[in-house]
Image (cartoon, helix red, strand yellow):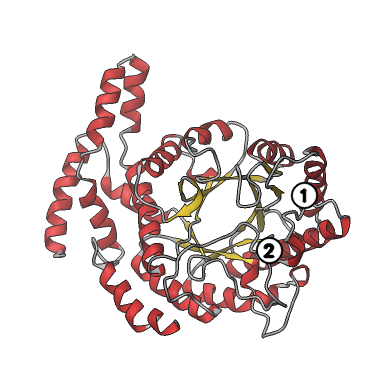
Amino acid sequence: MNSKNIGKMYGMAKARYAELGINTDRAIRQALAIPVSMHCWQADDVGGFEVKEGAVNAGGIMATGNQGGRARTPDEARADYDLVLKLVPGVMRLNIHACYAETSGKVVDRDKLEPRHFATWMKWAKKKGLGLDFNPTFFAHPKANDGYTLSHPDPKIRAFWVRHAKACRKIAAAMARSQGSPCSVNHWIPDGSKDYPADRWSPRANLTESLDEIFNDPGVSRTQCVDYVESKLFGIGSEEYVVGSAEYYSSYALSRGVGLCLDMGHYHPTETIHDKVSSFLQFHSRLLIHVSRPMRWDSDHVVLFGDDLRHLFLEIARGRAWDKVAIATDFFDASINRIAAYVIGLRATRKAILYSLLDPSARLAKEERKGSNASRLGLMEEMKTMPFGAVWDQLCLNRDVPLGADWLDVAGRYEEDVLSKRC
């Protein structure tokens, strides 16, 4: 695209938004500055790079599709991330799972992981100016094959996973020290039952005991390691009963002073999370948003610039809650070019953030207070056809990333030159 044409179109769009009292230059600056934590697992289909002894159950985590080019090593994954970061605008972070440890070809069980096993990740991130976030990996392990980890009836298995979570929090604290900023740590477990359980009480009591032990570790600073807990409606192998339900984790997080994670796909298929933000933030101090796109079930499809995404960020913007919310993507698709999947989802996320910052929220609220509900609804409708695309193009131009669909050519060449040779 011609940058002069972009400038002309942006000038007209800027004037249109200014008529509504919206400063597009300021919206662009703010949209670029809000961090988005890119998930590591789209590059390799959630396989990780740890050295294992034999195959294990994936524990309800499944990337579908047979597209070639999956990253087979940490270096290949980092090369993929390097390209993605050149194609998406704004401040980025990288969200790593514990199973992405680099152990020099040795088997290191998860309760024995140390910061040194992520030293290369920290060095690479520091060079790139990226903040790192972290996740314990409570799946794809022999001690998770029956579907229970921190809530397991066997105290020895529970103790193993508690040690793993404690080790992960120490790793996160080391990441925070390395990068000079806090590291968000999200705790999700697959625990649950495929069919009706006879006892719903004991697993939740066990989970509470395990989490209390994890978070009460005096050796880890809560300002360096910022913890979140993530609920789920159901999963593969936990269709009927999930130990860590929304009600459970909301109550636990509130009573223990840890953060609550809201995943866009972890609720009923007809339920969206945008209405939950203003409710939870009346009481919770912070939220982690997992930006995803469910389809029929919690399938973590590539994020698109749809109503759910726009409504979510509009709620955050209207509540001026950016300082209370951390944003991370969470999707994986092995049926399409993995670089393209990343770029589509991340650009859609940044696009929705920008869209929310171009909302005439003050005017809408004023009309609502006056009882002018028709004016409120009419203005909301008119905003849908404002020249938003020109503002988005200017944002991309400001950060020297490809405009429009130009990035597809870059991703296509990378697939031909790099990904196809991994098959």
Nearest the camera: 12 or 70? Answer: 70
Is 328 rendered above or below residue 419?
above
Within-10-Å neighbours for mark 2: few <14, some 14–19, many 20+: many
Judging by the rendered image, the residue that carries numbered circle 1 is 211
Element type where label 2 sits in the image: helix
- Which residue sits furthest top? 371
Evaluate if marks 2 and 1 touch, with contact meaning CB atoms under 8 Å apart. no
Q: Nearer the viewer, mark 2 or mark 1?
A: 1
Q: Residue placed at 17% from the left, 40% from the top?
A: 16
Within-10-Å neighbours for mark 1: few <14, some 14–19, many 20+: some
User: Could you tell whether 272 is left or right of 417 in the image?
Assistant: right
Q: Position of residue 265 (x, y in %)?
A: 51, 46
- Where residue 32 is drawn, which disc sits there? none
Judging by the rendered image, the residue that carries numbered circle 2 is 173
Q: Residue placed at 63% from the left, 39% from the top?
A: 246
Q: Position of residue 400 (x, y in %)?
A: 28, 67
Is 314 rendered above or below residue 119?
above
User: Could you tell whether 107 is left or right of 292 in the image?
Assistant: right
Element type where label 1 sits in the image: helix
User: Real-space Cα distance between discs 2 and 1?
Assistant: 18 Å
